[in-house]
Image (cartoon, helix red, strand yellow):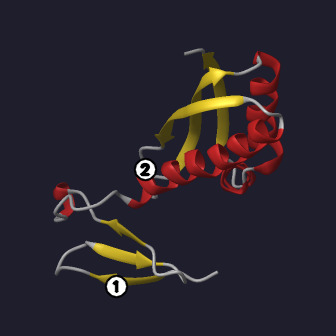
Amino acid sequence: MTINLHRIDDAFNLEATNADGLTVVSDGSPAIGGNNNGMRPMEMVLSAVGACSSIDIILLLKKQRQDLKDIRIAVTGERRDEEPRIFTGIHVSYELVGDIDEKKAERACRLSMEKMCSVSLMLKAGGVEVTWDYKVVSE
C-alpha cells in the first residue's frame, strides 16, 4: 500500500492520493502558519479509528441480519503536553441506530475493538489506551 502526497500551497496544505486516485486533504493549524484547508494529521488518525471500526461493525451486524439504519461515532483523543504530542488515550463512542439486538451490538463493537480494527490495534500496540462504549437507538 502506497499513499503519495504533494504540496498544494506554500505552507502545510497537502493532498494525499491512493492507488485508486482517491484523495484526502490535510493542513496545519493557523497557529503554525497553516490555512485551515484540511484536517490535521492527528485528526485523521482519530478519523481512521472510527472509519476502520465502523466497517467491522457494519459488516458484523449485516452478517447477523441486524437492521442497522445508521452508525454515528465520536472519537476523542487525549495527547500528552510535551513534544512529540502523541496520543495517550483514545475513546470511541458508538451510536447504532435501528432495530438491533443489544447483545449483537455489544459483540460487534467488542470484536472490532479487540480483534479486528487494525488501526486501533496498532495504536494499542504502541501504548495508547483505547476505550469504547456504545448505545443502541431504535428508530
Residue drawn 65% across the image and 24% down it: 133
Q: In this view, does 138 lie to the left or right of 40?
A: right
Q: Is any atom of residue 105 visible in this view?
A: yes
- Residue with the mark numbered 2: 82
Report helix, strand or loop for mark 2. loop
| Of 51 and 58, the residue lying toward us | 58
> What's the residue type where badge 2 is placed?
Glu
Q: In this view, does 11 lie to the left or right of 27?
A: left
| Of 135 and 2, the residue lying toward us | 135
Residue 135's place in the image compared with 49, above or below, is above
Q: Mark 1 or mark 2: which is in front?
A: 1
Residue 84's place in the image compared with 8, above or below, is above
| Of 53 and 35, the residue lying toward us | 53
Q: Which mark is first along the chain, 2 or 1?
A: 1
Q: In this view, does 25 lie to the left or right of 83?
A: left
The crowding category of the residue bearing disc 2, from other C-alpha atoms within 10 Å (few below 14, some 14 to 19, many at least 20), is few
Q: Quadrant of the N terminus?
A: bottom right
Q: Residue 88's spot in the image, x, y percent?
A: 57, 42
Q: Residue 68's spot in the image, x, y percent?
A: 64, 31
Q: Quadrant of the C terminus?
A: top right
- Residue with the mark numbered 1: 6
Report helix, strand or loop for mark 1. strand
